[in-house]
Amino acid sequence: MPSARQKGASVAAQDAAVESVVGSAADTVRDREIGVEQEHLDQVYRRLEEKIHEAEFLMNDAAKRGQVGTPGALAERDAQVFRAGVHLNRLNNEFEDFLFGRIDLLHGKDGRKGPDGAFTSVEPADDAVRPDNTAEIGETLHIGRIGVLDSDYAPLVIDWRAPAAAPFYRSTPVDPGRVVRRRVIRSKGRKVLGVEDDLMRPELTATLNGQTLPVVGDGALMAALGQARSHTMRDIVASIQAEQDLVIRAPAASVTYVEGGPGTGKTAVALHRAAYLLYQDRRRYAGGILIVSPTPLLVAYTEGVLPSLGEEGQVAIRAVGSLVDGVEATVYDEPAVARVKGSSRMLKVLRNAARGALEMPDTTPRNGQLSFGEEPAAAPGTPSQLRVVAFGRRLELEADELRRIRHNVLGGSAPVNLLRPRARRLLLDALYAKSGAAGRHPGDPELAAELRSSFDEDVTGEDSFIAFLDAWWPELTPRAVLAAMGDERRLGRWARRVLNPGEVRRLARSLRRDALSVHDVALLDELSTLLGTPARPRKRRELDPLDQLTGLEELMPQREETQRERAERLAAERTEYAHVIVDEAQDLTPMQWRMVGRRGRHATWTVVGDPAQSSWSSPEEAAEARDEALGSRPRRRFELTVNYRNPAEIAELAATVLHLAMPGMRSPSAVRSTGVRPRFAVLPDGGDLADAVRAEAERLLEQVDGTVGVVVAMNRREQAARWLAGLGERVVALGSLEAKGLEYDATVVVSPAEIADESPAGLRVLYVALTRATQQLTVVSGRRDQPDAQGVPELLRD
Ligand SMILES: Nc1ncnc2c1ncn2[C@@H]1O[C@H](COP(=O)(O)OP(=O)(O)OP(=O)(O)O)[C@@H](O)[C@H]1O
């Protein structure tokens, strides 16, 4: 258990620290130890600079001697220097704590070394600890964001993802392995600022180079958790806990399934896992990992974490409303509409629409608008008759015949746009049958075929036939079909026996709106599959006419694509991924699961979520769709049990709502407490909510250094932004659904009853709202909340 481990380790560290260093002597030991780590960090930077010089020298030397070799080799050397330069630059400027850990280990069972230069043995040698409980440190490893070897290939820094770094995260006083002391190093740029130690074997007296192993400070984790929050998430690489590490390093087989309550680090773990997978198998995963996030706000909040882990541009993090290229939906439907759009009942409606839309009037956008008015009997664009002249005869197909042909073509489930060639062929068959030419050469199939082929040529060359086909079997776009569903009468037909009239009315109304909603995106994606995209002839690369004249084109080597260009191109072309990570998985609707599933048909998966935070009204239906998307792949389940975000005081209050929302579900245990209880503010009769909320936000801005989030029911979103106008960037207003996954130093939750009554999932949404704060929480109640004398609203009373 990480909490036990944390406590055990810290207490042990504290005791040892008290024993060995008292009063100001502690500062001396700390300073000395900081000095020791500074020396090591200096050595690391010297080595990195050396490597850059080496690469530069190689290149200059090669250029001077004119032995450039192939342009590819030059480019590779160039790239090496470039990469090394970027490296150093980032180490100096971006990685505040490039080197962040150290472990001091006992001698191992055997003397084998791994590729990173560290000994591989997990267990200590039998004689590593002497009978009098003393021991000599056999190996010291420093852990950082990337690995660095010295000129003798000894490890100066071990990459945090390397196997040798695992004991830094996994070792506990209960199961210490070879680790005696675990140290977290805090640095900025090239300067070491502090060290914090945990003893994994407090019973030992260990020596390093003949000196007793010193122990400094307590609680690197606590220091990290207490820090003020900004609008971007930080990595947790220096303090990943054992149960989290198990998930991050789990083999990427089939489905890794992780559940855990609010603040247990699910999002953090998901991001670190992406970095780990890249490290493990870069060829497979570079550019091939997709992280699906519930909101653009959470994407913005988390997207800095991977670059801080040294992984830039290799992972696509996309909000569920932006999974379809070119679409960025941020509008939310009202709960009753969202429920319909997310439900798998939509599948049938969309299938009908994709086929029925062929019979729509005109679907060509005019002035950016689509026209779907009343359906006249013979609307322009939906011809009810085909007339052509072939072999000197006028041939006609009437409405009935056309309908039969269409029906015939549409039998089966092939994508509608891909059926156009078949429609064309059946039209030609029907016309040929009428031409009287069909039976002309009964004994000579070759002649008959020739005749038929010249007939087809005749007809298909006619403008009237081309125009007819374009109008009668137009290429449909998902947007056009979705817009067509905005017509209530038509939608009623497509949704017969699936949706009730009220649902049809609300759905049609929402689809007449200009902006796409988050739930529309999954419908678009489904339509895109149902409609299909006809293959277009590939554009041939245009050749430079001069090259052709001189024949130079064949002699000139093609410019090689850089790695980065390649990654970007692959990402742009990619519709399927090698690994899909779903964050806040409990929120995906069945239709969204289908959309996400299509992007990882051959992928391995990591799915993280918390059923207690689901904002979807029927979790059972979503679970079914999830199981369908993930197929029969076996799952490895993990549970995260410790809440690193909320202080116990806030977690306790949230637990009362969890109890109402999901009776019997356990809350994660909070890892720390602040002594600050949540505050309850009540709106006096006739009082103004705007004033009350603004006053609370101002008060909290005074109290915390970082951010303040004000969470309101969705329909108060815009209003709340106005209440807070002018208070500065540290404070933000959020609709309840937008708060998902985010965190703030302090939060104001406005009217729990309003949030709870918003939808059938309201209590779970309220649970999310109440678990966003790292330090302070204020609940503002109106009359509807029925606060008691202390201002505690009814929903939050024990
Ligand atoms: N091992 C750790 N060391 C330091 N901070 C941690 C650790 N694990 C989690 N945290 C911090 O705890 C907070 C919550 O983490 P995260 O947002 O990943 O939780 P979550 O499980 O996704 O929460 P929710 O379900 O509420 O969205 C973050 O600030 C994260 O940085």
Image (tube, rainbow, N blue to C red):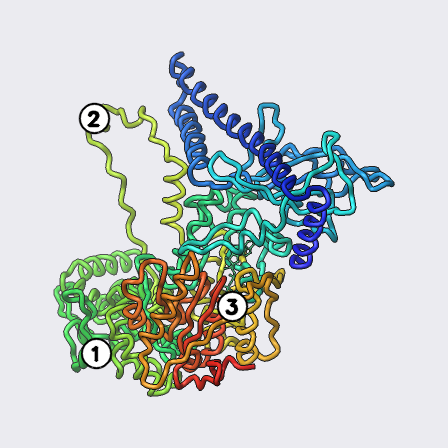
Badge 1 local density, few (<14 within 10 Å), some, or many (20+)? Answer: few
Q: Quadrant of the N terminus?
A: bottom right
Q: Secondary structure at mark 1?
A: helix
Q: Quadrant of the C terminus?
A: bottom right
Amino acid beneath label 2 = Leu
Amino acid beneath label 1 = Ala
Q: Which mark is residue 412?
A: none
- 362 and 113: which is toward the camera: 113
- 282 and 300: which is toward the camera: 300
Q: To which residue does mark 3 refer? A: 626
Q: Against 423, is 560 above or below?
A: above
**Left/right of residue 358 with respect to residue 595 in the rendered view:** left
- Label 1 and label 2: CA atoms lie apart by 57 Å
Q: Is residue 415 visible?
A: no
Q: To which residue does mark 1 refer? A: 399
Residue at (53% x, 55% y) in the render: 225
**Left/right of residue 193 with respect to residue 559 in the rendered view:** right
- 28 and 722: which is toward the camera: 28
> Upstream in the sequence, badge 1 or badge 2?
1
Q: To which residue does mark 2 refer? A: 549
Q: Against 32, is 692 above or below?
A: below
Disc nearest the viewer among 1 and 2: 2
